[in-house]
Image: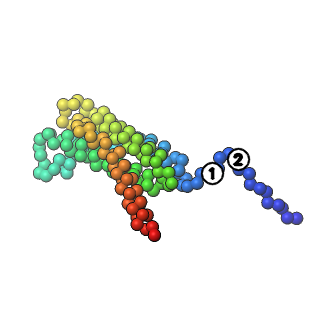
Amino acid sequence: MKQRARPVVLDGPPPRVGTPWAGRLPFVLLFGQAVLGLLVGLVWWLLTREPAPWTVGEPVVTSTAVYPMARDGVFTVLTGLVGLAAGVLVLARSGERPLPPFGAASAGALAGALLAAGVGSALPPTAGDDAAHVTVHAWAVVLVQPFVVAAVVAVVTLVRSLLEWVDRP
């Protein structure tokens, strides 16, 4: 005897179309960068507590007056790299709806940079007059990570749009 095929009945919402990351990507971008900010703050503190010669310039200046610039520069590079990775993740995994992941990535970038600055500044020594005290002096560097996320997404989206426009008949 032949068995008849049963009709498929779907209960609940239809399955999501797109990548498996589609629903979790904003959460990962927001909270992942915030948690990563804690690690970036620790790395920043380790690199700049007593800055290496490659961070203060050549020839090595014996004055501690260049330490704030070196610390802000290292902070800028570290947060810029995290922002670049987040921007690439937004572009690679967002699919048809890039706005929620982009918004989450921007907010997560700001939160991560603020947490990194806070962690690096909270680690010992905490006396502000000590030359080994790590802190952000130019607070504009906190905006580097969200700016890099926005710049990467904007430039790649613009280039993609222009290439699609040129390819039209």
Q: How many marks?
A: 2
Which residue bears the numbered disc 1? 15
Q: Which mark is residue 11?
A: 2
Nearest to the observer: residue 12 or residue 62 = 12
Q: Residues within 10 Å of mark 1 (few under 14, many from 20)?
A: few
In percent of width and height, residue 151 lies at 34, 51
Nearest to the observer: residue 128 or residue 137 = 137
Nearest to the observer: residue 17 or residue 21 = 17
Under mark 2, the amino acid is Asp
Q: Residue at horizontal 54%, vertical 55%?
A: 19
Residue that extends furthest to the right in the rendered view of this protein: 1
Asked if residue 29 lies left or right of residue 75, the reply is right
In which quadrant will I find the C terminus?
A: bottom left
In percent of width and height, residue 145 lies at 33, 46
Asked if residue 38 shows in the view, the reply is: no
* C-alpha separation, residue under disc 2 versus residue under disc 1: 10 Å
Badge 2 marks a residue whose secondary structure is: loop
Under mark 1, the amino acid is Pro
